[in-house]
Image (cartoon, helix red, strand yellow):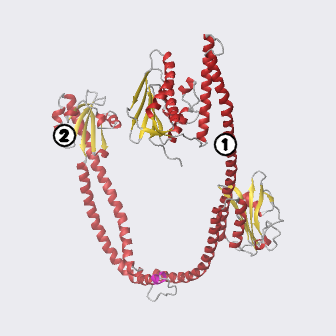
Amino acid sequence: MKVRNSIIWRMLAWFLLLALIPLGAVMIFVQRQVNQTVLDVELQAAVKEARLHAAESGYHPGAFAEHTQMYEEGRDMAFIVGPEGTYLEHTAAHKAGTPAGDDFTAELLTTFFSAESGSVDNSAAGQILGFAAVPGEDSVLVVVKDNQVVSNTLASLSRSIFLQLSVILLITSTVSGVAILAVVNPLRQLANFADQVGSGNLDATIDQTDLEGEIAVLAESLSSMTGRLRDLISSLESKVEERTRDLAIASEVSRQITRVLDMDLLLPELVEKTRQGFNLHSVSLYLYDPQTQALLLEAGTGREGVPMGPDPKSLPITARPSLVAQVARERKAEIINDIKESTVPFSTPRLQETRAEAAFPMLVSDELVGVLDLQSKSVGRFQESESQIFSTLAEQIAIAVRNAQLYREQEHVAHELERADLMKSQFLASMSHELRTPLNAIINFTQLIAMGVAGPVTEDQVSMLNSSLNSSKHLLQLINDVLDISKIQAGKLSLYVEEDVNLSDEIQAAVDMAAPLLQKQNAVMDQPIRFIQDIDDQLPLAACDRRRLRQVLLNLLSNAIKFTERGSITLSAKNKGEEVIFAVMDTGPGIPEEMRARIFEPFIQTADGIKHAQGTGLGLPISRSLVQAHGGNLWVESRAEEGTTFFFTLPFRPPTAG
């Protein structure tokens, strides 16, 4: 709707709004006072009833049921609660002897015993409570009143107040409408004029013959404003065109920034695009070197885009006088629109045609990256309106430079890490050959000597040879674990998957390998540890690496044997349709909650593991990686002093390597 057709309704709306504000405030004040008064009356009534019933119950034992019969229907109730928080008497007889904490919060129960008598507004539960101590007893009688009646009374009062105020508002609106009609005609003329101007007709005029007073002054002001608006629009169109061009150039430079990470390519392109886009005489890009505290001229263009050659390549940040050094020190943009009137020399004196210069700091989070220096052959070239565009451009270039620097550093670090990883792999390969080969020879020769092949040996010698043999085997296992974890971390773990592997046979093989460990543990125990197998009779054939499956089972069984000093160890395997779920459960000390996630990290052991002084903390990380390589998962459940259970799943067919 046009302005001239809606002005009456707008003014009427304003009058109504001005009337509604005080009326609404009065209504809110009155309603709050009424609400508080009614609530206070109900609270006082509740505490009086509580005192009356408490006195009767104190002086006439057994009178509680007689005097509280009025509460047996509806939501009202009464009860006597003892210091232990138990109902001693209750209008609902079945609640006697039950805890009052089932119906009321501990804070509320504490309030009942905080004074001789009182009341509580428990509106959140739809209740008003009155309480009083029973004379001669260490107990409190509480009356619970349903505040629905209070709510209904307040609602009725609110409707009455609203109706009365609505009548007042209607009368006020009628009077306001009559007053509006008396002044609307002159305003219609102003509205019609404003409507024409708003439609774009800046040559519209207004007839001021019949206008008087403030409305005449307003009409004159509108006519004057229309004239100034014509002039402003004319100049604004040219400025918008210039700003649009500048923003398009800045946008193009920004797109270039995001595409290039090589500074040798990035910086020359940036300065040349900036010079051409903003029609400048020269653009220079200085980067700050914190070590030498100098500004290095990394890229620059002179007249007609020719890269600058013989100019100095380095400028100390302390140089004075120097516009570029000054901007770097103060980290604040500086503009000189006429270098002949400036005491600070411009940065490249060889460009004799320069007449104006502007320098902008390149910052990333208040950290100086460099300085963007712009030069023009026109006096007054750099206006304040363009300063924000150039400042934003300098910030974007700073971010691009920092990204390029970080990319270069990342490439260097990646190269060094790749080199270190290669050296580690070569070292481990060499260690595998240099350590395992002689260690296997030591194990074999020790076994032969212990068997008496090289001549008779005494029992003491056999015992010492067996100790040496066990230590050698333990060392060989440590070497194998280190090699496995290195392969896993390098992503070079591979499986030798065989089809139709009999899981029952592999489970039995792992059990046989763990049997000597259990026998050794039982030899020092007062009561042997029971070993329980809970294996499904018909486990399906699976595609897996049988050696790695036995390794996982043996790791879990060895851990269970090592940490169990009494009770039992249970190994189970259950067919669950698409996969088999294995579980190794022990009755050991359990794993603390804060360690349950960390035990799957390499070289991490629990306090009990360190106490046993066995292993390197690699068994569980290796086992989880082997299970995950088969497409399954391994996790732990444990309770302190009750034992630990390790579960892992084995799909019938592992995921296809890809």
Regarding mark 2 in the picture, which secondary structure is present there? helix
* Crowdedness near tag 2: few (<14), some (14–19) or many (≥20) residues, C-alpha within 10 Å: some
Q: Position of residue 249 (x, y in %)?
A: 64, 71
User: Closer to the camera, 442 or 130?
Assistant: 442
Regarding mark 1 in the picture, which secondary structure is present there? helix
Q: Main secondary structure of the magenta part?
A: helix
Is 91 situated left or right of 353 in this image? left
Q: Position of residue 510 (x, y in %)?
A: 49, 29
Amino acid at circle 2: Tyr
User: Closer to the camera, 211 or 522?
Assistant: 522
Quadrant hosting residue 134:
top left
Question: Is residue 324 at least partly visible in the picture?
Answer: yes
Q: Position of residue 475 (x, y in %)?
A: 62, 26
Numbered tag placed on residue 421 in the rendering: 1
Q: Residue at x 20, y 33 (%)?
A: 94
Numbered tag placed on residue 71 in the rendering: 2
Point out the tag, 1 or 2, that comes first from the N-terminus. 2
Label total for image: 2
User: Closer to the camera, 450 or 645?
Assistant: 450
Q: Position of residue 116 (x, y in %)?
A: 30, 33
Is 49 magenta? The answer is: no
Q: In the rendered structure, are the residues bearing label 1 and label 2 in contact, judged by CB atoms less than 8 Å apart?
A: no
Is 336 situated left or right of 79 in this image? right
- Which tag is nearer the camera, tag 1 or tag 2? 1
Q: Is residue 108 above or below residue 274?
A: above
Q: Is residue 322 above or below residue 436?
A: below
Q: Which residues are magenta?
A: 193-198
The quadrant of the image that shows the N terminus is bottom left
Q: Residue at x 29, y 64 (%)?
A: 165
Mark 1 → mark 2, Cα distance in angstroms: 83 Å
Is 194 magenta? The answer is: yes
Amino acid at circle 1: Asp
